[in-house]
Image: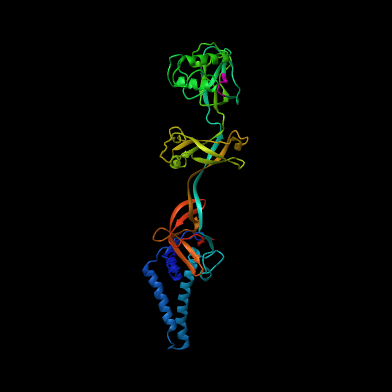
Amino acid sequence: MNGQKATAVAAESAGGPEGASVVVPADRSEGAAALAPAESGEVAAVESATSEASLVAEEPPAAPARRRRRPLRIALAVLAAVAVTAAAVAAATGVFGGTEDGATASDAASGPPKTAEVKQTSLTRSETLDGTLGYGEATPAQASGQGVVTWLPGEGDTVERGEPVYRADEKKVPLLYGATPLYRPLEAGAEGRDVELLEKNLSALGYGGFTVDDAYTAGTADAVRDWQEDLGREETGTVQPGDAVVAPGARRVTEVQAALGAPPNGAVLTWTGTERTVTVQLAVKDEDLVSGEGARATVTLPDGSTAEAKVAEVGTAVTAEPAQEGEAQQQSGEDATLPVTLTVEDQRKLGRYQAAPVDVAFEAETREDVLAVPVEALVALREGGYAVEAVRADGTQYLPVKLGMFSDGLVEVSGQGVTAGLKVGVPK
């Protein structure tokens, strides 16, 4: 009899808990094999052999003692073989909660080797990914002025609104905040987003006498003259494309690229934002982790300290490059990732770290007041689905359950008879 068929005999001879259908314990012991129904003919053969042996043993003596001993020995041998086989298979598969230290079927009858309580708790689906702490991607500061470069900031310097990015012929070229670069001369009568950007910056720097809108008026020209005077530039009342550099906010210089004495054309330096951010490559399939408004995450630093972060930007999905040029690569939606940028509101939480690898834990969903058990308490039913082994004073019983969220080794369960505080069997 092979292991599968012997298991079926062991399961039938064990007589499981009342109300339980044939079940397949999920990893009740190391190396446990899945239970399967034995072929009916072989079960019948074993039962027949057992029955015949019993009948022979119970026949009244009708011959000399020497002839009576032989049938009795055969009967006892058959019964012993069946019992040993069933006990061995049960111990190997954990059908009776057998243990490695030699627990027998009668020992296991008292219940599983270990129990846990059904908890009423809150579960949160989370995902922890590798991230990078830094100042974000460096971008070039473009110049398009006249003359030669006579001054440049140093690496690590911070440039804020109104402060010079560089000097050309000793004239300051300041930083303005915004998204639209200066691409044309601005003077009275001009209209557009670039005009509005200029007026917003003039107002933020303390200049007035105009309405902040998209129209360049005489009042705007007067404010520009005052601004030019403070910069030490010629007071023309008009603004040329090379008179200022536009960036989203304050910048931190990462690398100086222009040389003193060179014309201010092209990238004079590269810079980043001034606040440290965290970047993560998120699999497209996990996009729901950052899809909610104000999605947040917890950042764990190399020293184990943590800081709360907020999703600031989700980029466009990209796929990995082939490992070698010309190498074929199968690409699918699972390969694609989204670059995600997170901001840390309390920069003090980041300590002195300027750049470092970090762990980023995203939380997508929380379910309050649910019933949960350890994942290992689940038992796979032969007919499909799962159950838990309820342990009570009067014995054990398998209760079918419906599964919900998985989180931190726990799984949400629901089903008839499953209540908070119920003891369920788990592997040793």
Rendered image quadrant of residue 307: top right
Q: Is residue 397 visible?
A: yes
Magenta segment includes 164: yes
Q: Is residue 413 left or right of residue 169?
A: left
Q: Is residue 57 left or right of residue 225?
A: left
Q: In the picture shown, does residue 352 fall above or below 9?
A: above
Q: Residue at x 52, y 38 (%)?
A: 310
| Colour pattern | rainbow
Q: Is residue 173 left or right of residue 190?
A: right
Camera-side residue: 92 or 427? 427
Magenta segment includes 425: no
Q: Position of residue 68 (x, y in %)?
A: 45, 85
Q: Residue at x 57, y 19 (%)?
A: 164
Q: Position of residue 241 (x, y in %)?
A: 48, 16
Q: Position of residue 155 (x, y in %)?
A: 60, 24
Q: In the picture shown, does residue 97 fall above or below 357?
A: below
Q: In the picture shown, does residue 231 fall above or below 390?
A: above
Q: Quadrant of the N terminus?
A: bottom left
Q: Residue at x 43, y 61 (%)?
A: 416
Q: Which residues are magenta?
A: 160-165
Main SS, magenta residues: loop
Q: How many marks are shown on the rendered structure? A: 0
Q: Quadrant of the C terminus?
A: bottom right
Q: Is residue 141 visible?
A: no
Camera-side residue: 25 or 306? 306
Q: Residue furthest left?
A: 41
Q: Residue furthest front?
A: 209
